[in-house]
C-alpha cells in the first residue's frame, strides 16, 4: 500500500533517566539516537542541575540531531526536573499540558507538522500504583488487616486518578481537529477501563501489525503484559510495531511506523 506520509514514533518510560545514573543515561540516549525514529516520546525524564548527573543541557546535546523539542516538566525545584520530553524531526506547535491532580503525572499535547499535513501527538504518563516493597508483605496478615492496609488504599486512589486521567485524554482526542497519535505509559493493561476509554475509536499499532510477537513492555511484569502503547486514528494505518527489550529502564521501548 502506498502512503502519502509515514511516521516512525518511539515511546519509552526511561525510569527517571536510569534513576540518575549518568553513564547508563548516556548509553540509553545513544541507543535512542540509533533507532532512526521521527519522533521520540519519553516519560519519567529526570534531569539535574548537578553536572555529576544528567543535566538538561547535556540531554539536549545528546539528542541534538532532533531539531524540534518539547520539554514538559511536572515537577521541578532547585535541584532537578521531572516530566515528559518529545524529540522530533518535524516542527512542533500548539504545545500544552493536560494537567492532573497528581504528584508526578501529566499528558503532553502538541501538533506535529509532517510535510504538508498535521497530526496531534498526545504523550501520556498516567498514574502508577506507587507500590513499595512493604506494601506487598502481607503473608501474615488477616483478610481484615489486608483490607485496611496501605496497599488497598493505594490501589483504590491510583485507580480513581487514572480513570480521571483517561477521561481527560479522551476529551483531548475528541477535540482534536487533526488525526491523533497517542502514546506512552498508561500504567494499565489492555483489559482495563483506562485502555478501552482511551483506545475507543483508535487503532492499537501493536495489535494490528505485530502478529506472533509477545508484547510485554515492562521488565518485571508477567509475560505478555502491556502497559505502554502507540495508538493512532482510524484513518491512519499501523505498518509495523515492535517492542525492543533493552535493559536501560524497567520498561521496554515501543516503536511503530504509521502510514496515511
Image (spheres, helix red, strand yellow):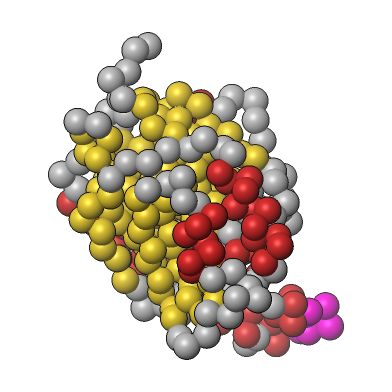
- In the image, residue 234 above or below residue 245: above
Asked whether the viewer can see residue 3, the reply is yes
- In the image, residue 173 above or below residue 146: above
* Magenta stretch bounds: 137-142
* Picture quadrant where residue 167 is located: bottom left
The residue lying at 65 percent from left, 30 percent from top is 213
Asked whether the viewer can see residue 192, the reply is no
217 with respect to 2 (left or right): right
**Residue in front for this viewpoint, 125 or 51:** 51
View extreme (right): residue: 140
The residue lying at 39 percent from left, 32 percent from top is 7
- Residue 67: x %, y % from top left: 37, 48
Position of the C terminus by quadrant: top left
* Picture quadrant where residue 214 is located: top right
184 with respect to 94 (left or right): right
2 with respect to 256 (left or right): left
Position of the N terminus by quadrant: top left
- In the image, residue 84 above or below residue 173: below
Q: Is the magenta stretch mostly helix, strand or loop?
A: loop
- In the image, residue 156 above or below residue 40: below
**Residue in front for this viewpoint, 10 or 143:** 10
- Residue 244: x %, y % from top left: 65, 40
* Image label count: 0
The residue lying at 75 percent from left, 77 percent from top is 133
The residue lying at 28 percent from left, 45 percent from top is 91
View extreme (top): residue: 1
Residue 61 is inside the magenta segment? no
- Residue 97: x %, y % from top left: 29, 65
**Residue in front for this viewpoint, 26 or 245:** 26
Amino acid at each position: 500500500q502506498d502512503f502519502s506520509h509515514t511516521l516512525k514514533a518511539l515511546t519509552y518510560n526511561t525510569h527517571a533517566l536510569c534513576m540518575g545514573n549518568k553513564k547508563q543515561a548516556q548509553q540509553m540516549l545513544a541507543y535512542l539516537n540509533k533507532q532512526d525514529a521521527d519522533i521520540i516520546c519519553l516519560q519519567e525524564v529526570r534531569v539535574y542541575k548537578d553536572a555529576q548527573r544528567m543535566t538538561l543541557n547535556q540531554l539536549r546535546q545528546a539528542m541534538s540531531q532532533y531539531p524540534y523539542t518539547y520539554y514538559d516538566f511536572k515537577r521541578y525545584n532547585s535541584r532537578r526536573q521531572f516530566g515528559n520530553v518529545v524529540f522530533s524531526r518535524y516542527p512542533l506547535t500548539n504545545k500544552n499540558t493536560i494537567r492532573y491532580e497528581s504528584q508526578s503525572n501529566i499528558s503532553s499535547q502538541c501538533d506535529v507538522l509532517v510535510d504538508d499535513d498535521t497530526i496531534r501527538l498526545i504523550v501520556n504518563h498516567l498514574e502508577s500504583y506507587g507500590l513499595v516493597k512493604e506494601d506487598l508483605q502481607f503473608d501474615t496478615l488477616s483478610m481484615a488487616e489486608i483490607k485496611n492496609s496501605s496497599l488497598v488504599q493505594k490501589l483504590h486512589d491510583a485507580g480513581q486518578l487514572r480513570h480521571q486521567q483517561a477521561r481527560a485524554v479522551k476529551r483531548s482526542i475528541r477535540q482534536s481537529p487533526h488525526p491523533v497519535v497517542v502514546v506512552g505509559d498508561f500504567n494499565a493493561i489492555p483489559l482495563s477501563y483506562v485502555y478501552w476509554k482511551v483506545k475507543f475509536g483508535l487503532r492499537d499499532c501493536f495489535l494490528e501489525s505485530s502478529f506472533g510477537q509477545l508484547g510485554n513492555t515492562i521488565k518485571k511484569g508477567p509475560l505478555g503484559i502491556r502497559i505502554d502503547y502507540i495508538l493512532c486514528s482510524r484513518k491512519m494505518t499501523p505498518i509495523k510495531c515492535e517492542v525492543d527489550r533493552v535493559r536501560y529502564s524497567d520498561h521496554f521501548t515501543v516503536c511503530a511506523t504509521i502510514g496515511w
